[in-house]
Image (cartoon, helix red, strand yellow):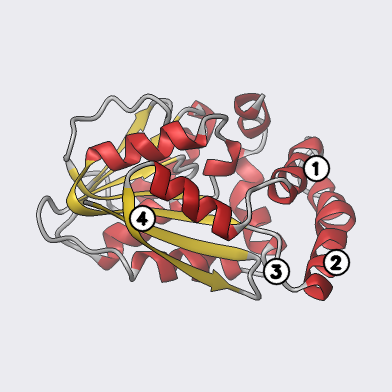
Amino acid sequence: MVRDIFATIPEGYDLLNRLLSLRRDVAWRRFAVHRMKFCKTNRLLDLATGTADLAMEAALAYPKIKVIALDFVSEMMVRGQRKIEKQHLSKRIQLLQADAQFLPIDEGAFDVASIAFGIRNIPERLKTLKEMTRVVTPGGQVMVLEMHLPGNRYIRKVYRSYLNHILPRIAGCFTKNQAAYSYLSDSITHFPKPAAFAGLMGEAGLHNVEQYPLTLGTTYLHIGYKA
């Protein structure tokens, strides 16, 4: 289902992300990238990379690193490849089509494994977190950037209204698949609270989990470290 949804929206995906987040998605990714630490392998694995925004942001911020950007929706990756070539990053970013739940990656191969706005679309979140933990080097980072319902009940009420009523209507002006953005609102509404997600990261074997609320708690950056 997720593959079918995202296969229909690659061309309008970036524009809608900027519009629907009031361009905050750019700032959220930049915030995450600036907290990455490369000290052993100088390699980043970016899961559910979509059109490769986070992968490119990291490659531009850290000129010495190489990136494997992974997704399982080929239509999104085609769009991402064009963007990578436009930024002259083809030698440093390799796209790989694969399932985040079953990574074809050696253990301890990366300093950082990241996923931005993708883990809520994955059925087996714990399995994915365990896979991310497996492929980073000891002391390496697992980073999850994801949207949540805000903790403040007044902000949460306004945000729910935006997700359920305004967001799908705006999306409908730009894509024929309005259902994709109805799914987006539903996936955010049912995503675990930050504290529960931190517990899931701990269950995956990560330690010293850090959580950064962004834009009134509508988005969180979660960072865990491999022992």
Q: Nearer the viewer, mark 4 or mark 3?
A: 3
Marks 4 and 3, how far apart at CA = 31 Å
Q: Secondary structure at mark 4?
A: helix
Q: Give residue 146's position: percent from left, percent from top.
A: 55, 55
Pointer 4 or 3: first along the chain = 4
Whether residue 186 is visible here, answered yes or no, is yes
Q: Position of residue 14 (x, y in %)?
A: 59, 52
- Quadrant of residue 77 within the rendered picture: top left
Residue 115 location in percent, x, y? 44, 48
* Dot label at residue 151: 3
Q: How many numbered badges does the structure rendering display?
A: 4
Which comes sooner in the sequence, label 3 or label 1?
3
Mark 2, other Cα within 10 Å: few <14 / some 14–19 / many ≥20: few
The residue that label 1 is drawn on is 182
Q: CA distance from mark 2 to mark 1?
A: 17 Å
In the image, which is nearer the foreground, mark 2 or mark 1? 2
Label 3 close to label 1 by CB (< 8 Å): no
Residue 26 tag number: none
Label 4 packing within 10 angstroms: few (<14), some (14-19), many (20+): many
| Crowdedness near tag 3: few (<14), some (14–19) or many (≥20) residues, C-alpha within 10 Å | some
Mark 1 and mark 4 lie on one chain; the one further toward the N terminus is 4
Q: Quadrant of the N terminus?
A: top right
* Image disc number at residue 157: 2
Q: Nearer the viewer, residue 170 or 211?
A: 211
In this rendering, the label closer to the viewer, 2 or 3: 3
Q: Which residue is mark 4?
A: 56
- At label 2, which amino acid type do we have? Lys
The single residue placed furthest to the left in the displayed view is 40
Q: Quadrant of residue 64?
A: bottom left
Residue 69 appears in the figure:
no
